[in-house]
Amino acid sequence: MRQRSLIAMTAALAAGALTLSACGSRDDKGGDSAAGGDTTVVIGVDAPLTGDLSALGLGIKNSVDLAAKQANEKEHVKGVTFKIEALDDQAQPSSGQQNATKLVADKDVLGVVGPLNSSVAESMQKVFDDAKLVQVSPANTNPALTQGPDWNTGDKNRPYQAYFRTATTDAIQGPFAAQYIVNKAEKTKAFIIDDKKTYGAGLAATFKAEFEKLGGKVVGTDHVNPEAKDFSAVATKVKNSGADVVYYGGEYPAGGPLSKQIKDAGAKVVVAGGDALYSAEYIKLAGAGSAGDIATSVGAPIEELDSAKEFLANYKNANYKEAYEAYGGYAYDSTWAIIEAVKKVVEDNDGTLPEDARAKVVEAMQSVSFDGVTGKVSFDEFGDTTNKQLTVYTVEGGEHKPVESGTFTG
Amino acid sequence: MNELPQQLVNGLLLGSMYGLVAIGYTMVYGIVQLINFAHGEIFMTGGFGALSVWLILPGGTTMWVALPLMIIGAVLVATTVAIGAERFAYRPLRGGPRLAPLITAIGLSLALQQAVWAWYPEAKSARTFPQLSGGPFHIGNVTIQTGDVFLLIAAPVCMAVLAYFVNRTRTGRGMQATAQDPDTAKLMGVNTDRIIVIAFALGAVFAAVGAVAYGLKYGIVDYKMGFLLGLKAFTAAVLGGIGNIYGAMIGGLVLGTAETMATAYINHIPGMQQLGGQSWADVWAFVLLILVLLFRPQGLLGERVADRA
């Protein structure tokens, strides 16, 4: 009896899910509107717009929107109007893939900005690559996305030609953090925690390797479930391990409470992590104990860059409800990279979009080069950004303050 | 340093919270044989009820004044939601196939989550919850957080009150009678409709107290905090023997302790390094559940059917 009701329930849920996904894929607009006059090019956005990571995702969406508006205002590409279509991936790989399929089906989409999460990117790359639709991520830092699964052994192999990113990779971010923590912060006993996701586990591994190379000692490791909120058992382990630094490979929704509970347990440590801890939300969740916590993030702090002044002013004037957060500048540059690529394609084809515009845009993207908000925007042979700057931030007076910028050169 | 006492305390605290929420599952199941999957969300609305009271109170109110009011706010919101759910979602389906109210419960759970997400101000990400001031307390080498003190007091008090209510009061005995045989209870003059509403309301009261404890312990409430916790509390109820109120509390404590011990010690066992740590705690908790159900399908305290209420 119990079993039968379970089967019935599963069937009902599956039927419901199928109905919903069918609805989702039906509304692609048929036919291309390239015929004469004003052409509309759609730039897709995929990011978590709801849920725990929505602070970062909404910052990305707003920045893409701003870039498209600016391009239209300046008539940067003659005869082309840019429009954005933002989809919510809820930080779930499955939703990301559905969104990718949906964007591919819309013939007007010539480029996509996103996603936020490396794990989501993994599920989207092949869909976009098969459709030859260019994807530029402002935030993915997992090295394998551009350099193949064996990047660590020196066997670098670019798996997807249509994937680019303006964020630098964890192959640089993890060691960069390790250098700062050992040499400048003078912490040598680390407890390393990750959330087992593509981003978190990868970052923790690159940190660990460099940390040990520099003479640091790893006094403990653990993996946490990022959906959980109770980390008291882990906190007790950290306290008793005698660590003076906790490196967390993961994102702020779990990182904030984790930091709070570790400090509450009485451990005398600083919590350090990567770009996904660099958010005001982290400080909110971690509470007063977060003072001194360290986060590295991609690029130089955009508040201090001359090239970003215009972006900051425009963002403010556009009155977006949400802040641009850690990846706003990168999302803006990613969008402009797509716009520049579209411009080149249109100009090479006598002012109109060619038949195979998508493939041409992918080609053009490889040689895009311009001065963006975050510095020079161009891509190397793997689709990675050539701008490999990173910045260390520490929490001071309730906000992240930049300490030093630089890069890791081995 | 020996960390066993601290880890035991961690586990018992986590378990007390599971237990408080599990009581709601077990009481409703005991009386109407319905697994109220929306109970986790009733817990969540309680948390937001308490937060709302805090936001309405003038800034600078001390927690000693605010906390009782916040508990009242939490209880009011949670019971209103629970009674509303019973009246409008479950009662019309009573007597129908058992699958119908179950699916309704799942639907209600999603609806409540999304409603809070959409309409509560700034609830799209986690909201901070006010904290008790004062440093942590040290007993030997065990540290107890200020926020946990509330849970430490509230959980046993709630259990004692519930035991008194069910065993000694007229309504409580009416609940026991309804649980044993609703038709006969009705014939004996028990208003079973009222008893069912009271069961939902009582479950909500405990969930609301649990939600305030959650807010104080973790410093945040969010729209999906009831999902995972509700699932764990349901597991605790099954572990202790669903339908048995003492079983719910015991089940919660066992589950909480098991998760904490798994996090702390499994990876010290040679050859098990890969299977330890916090991310595996849930796996071990469910392994325990399966083992208990294999040998005692009725749960740890399940056989005291006469007591279920």
Image (cartoon, rainbow, N blue to C red):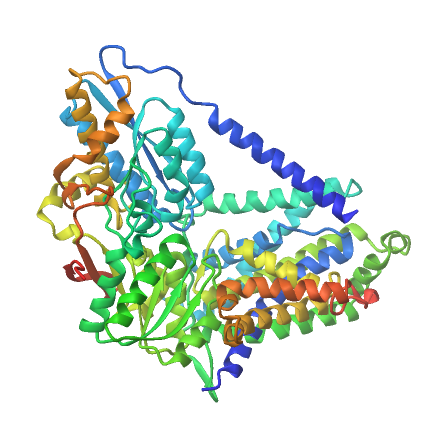
Give left or right: position of B210 versus A339. right
Residue placed most toward the observer, A131 or A46: A131
The quadrant in which the C terminus of chain A is found is bottom left
| Farthest left residue in view | A306
Q: Is residue B204 left or right of residue B73?
A: right
Residue at point 82% right, 53% down? B191
Q: Residue furthest bottom?
A: B140
Side (left or right) of A236 relative to A274: right
Residue at left offset 42%, top offset 39%: A96
Residue B144, x across and y down, in percent: 48, 79
Residue A336 drawn at (x, y percent): 19, 35
Locate residue B157, reporting x and y percent.
63, 74
Nearest the camera: B276 or B91? B276
Task: Give the answer, above or below, for where B300 lies relative to A37.
Answer: below
Furthest-top residue in view?
A: A36
Q: Is residue B134 visible?
A: no
Residue A365 quadrant: top left
Q: Is residue A223 visible?
A: yes
The quadrant in which residue A345 appears is top left
Q: Is residue B242 left or right of residue A17?
A: right
Residue at 42 percent of width and 22 percent of height: A28
Above or below residue B151? Residue A361 is above
What residue is drawn where x is 81% and y is 68%?
B304
Residue A401: x %, y % from top left: 19, 61
Tell me: residue B174, above or below residue A238: above
> How many labels sit on residues?
0
